[in-house]
């Protein structure tokens, strides 16, 4: 599964895997894809350095990338305490009442909230980039907008390709103007922050808008047949996020959450502002339902909502509170029905891709491979 971009990056398969887990990212690169480690949860530079050291030892010299979240111009320069102070009391009460209604105990004495979101603040993302500059990452991706010009220039100086996620052709054009090298066209079906245009429509629109810049198709891809579709629409590779959540290497810290993901159907997700303040696709839960209710206080803008709910999310995860337990995940969750290793996922993806190519070749009247 070779494209110009996969050759440029020196990977066997044009399959890019976004994941918050180093063990998954390393396994993706070892399997012949391109693992991209999500950095947003690393608020202490030492933790990121530790995990990048680990990646270095476990990628067998294969290339990998890093993903940061730099939402352009949001609460720039403000400290966490200053942002905290902007949260209305009524919202804090709403969270506490919701947790009480579901019997969620506080965190044990002395245990800090593990779910931090300050990685969405620009100065934190910049400290992550400082750490990353000591490692041979090959691609730097940004989730929410084009990275600032100095970040792009710094990456280019080091020979690092810069990618950015786009939910529309207009986003993609802005990325191209900002000097980005790779556009990830992420459709409505995707897990995490997402726009309103489905992948089938978005991918060719973005390819047309920014070509010959390479485009990766993202959102709703969990089989080799879907990879073939993305490539047929003009993408130079695919970018998968949800599918890795139920791999044996993933570290969700909750068997109950894994079980929920394995049982969920493609209709069990919702695009909600309940977690971060921006629309993000996630499992539909009593938590998302409560925030989306018309009588509720409504989610705060990013990064306030993330700060508001950080401890609550940790408590829900800690005590595995079934009805509230959720995670960002896309509609492809309906196909995530068993735990597999990353290598098994790759084997299934490449086999499915070959089947799809053979089928299309037969339909086109050409002999299969
Ligand atoms: C649990 C989870 C967390 C995510 N966090 C980020 C993130 O921090 N940065 C980012 O660029 N994309 C993030 N995404 C989106 C992925 O990069 C990717 O675009 C998306 O998962 C692709 O669609 P899919 O979920 O259908 O595979 C996340 C996705 C999931 C499922």
Image: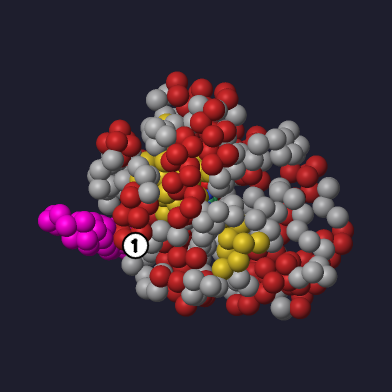
Circle 1 — which element?
loop
Q: Which residue is mark 1?
A: 223
Q: x, y percentage for residue 68?
A: 54, 41
Name the foreground residue: 246 vs 249.
246
- Residue drawn at x 87%, y 62% is 90
In this rendering, the answer to whether 41 lies above or below 335 is above
Name the foreground residue: 173 vs 26.
173
Q: Is residue 277 left or right of residue 153?
A: right
Q: Is residue 174 left or right of residue 211?
A: right
Q: Which residues are magenta?
A: 341-369
In this rendering, the answer to whether 94 lies above or below 142 is below
Q: Residue 91 occupies which quadrant of the picture?
A: bottom right
Question: Is 360 in the magenta?
Answer: yes
Q: Residue 97 occupies which quadrant of the picture?
A: bottom right
- Residue drawn at x 59%, y 43% is 144
- Residue drawn at x 53%, y 38% is 172
Q: Residue 166 occupies which quadrant of the picture?
A: top right
């Amino acid at each position: 599964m070779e494209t110009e971009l996969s050759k440029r990056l020196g990977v066997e398969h044009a399959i890019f895997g976004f994941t918050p887990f180093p063990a998954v990212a390393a396994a993706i690169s070892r399997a012949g894809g391109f693992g991209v480690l999500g950095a947003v949860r690393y608020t202490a530079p030492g933790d990121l350095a530790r995990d990048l050291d680990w990646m270095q030892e476990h990628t067998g010299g294969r290339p990998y990338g890093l993903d940061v979240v730099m939402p352009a111009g949001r609460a720039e320069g403000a400290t966490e305490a200053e942002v905290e102070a902007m949260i209305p009391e009524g919202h804090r009460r709403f969270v506490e009442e919701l947790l009480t209604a579901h019997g969620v105990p506080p965190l044990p004495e002395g245990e800090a909230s593990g779910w931090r979101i300050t990685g969405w603040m620009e100065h934190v993302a910049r400290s992550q980039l400082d750490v990353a500059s000591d490692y041979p990452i090959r691609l730097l991706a940004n989730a929410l907008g084009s990275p600032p010009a100095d970040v792009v220039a710094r990456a280019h100086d080091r020979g690092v390709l810069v990618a950015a996620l786009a939910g529309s052709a207009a986003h993609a054009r802005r990325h191209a103007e900002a000097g980005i090298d790779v556009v990830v066209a992420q459709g409505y079906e995707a897990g995490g922050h997402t726009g309103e245009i489905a992948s089938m429509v978005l991918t060719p629109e973005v390819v047309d808008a920014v070509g010959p810049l390479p485009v990766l198709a993202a959102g709703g891809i969990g089989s080799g047949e879907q990879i073939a579709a993305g490539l047929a629409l003009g993408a130079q590779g695919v970018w998968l996020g949800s599918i890795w959540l139920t791999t044996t290497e993933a570290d969700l810290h909750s068997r109950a959450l894994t079980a929920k993901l394995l049982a969920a159907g493609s209709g069990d997700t919702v695009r909600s502002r309940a977690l971060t303040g921006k629309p993000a696709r996630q499992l539909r839960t009593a938590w998302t339902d409560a925030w989306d209710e018309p009588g509720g206080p409504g989610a705060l803008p990013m990064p306030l909502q993330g700060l508001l709910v950080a401890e609550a999310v940790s408590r829900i995860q800690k005590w595995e509170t079934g009805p509230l337990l959720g995670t960002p995940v896309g509609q492809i969750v309906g196909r995530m029905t068993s735990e597999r290793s990353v290598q098994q996922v790759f084997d299934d993806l490449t086999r499915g891709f070959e089947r799809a190519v053979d089928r299309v070749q037969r339909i086109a009247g050409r002999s299969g491979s």
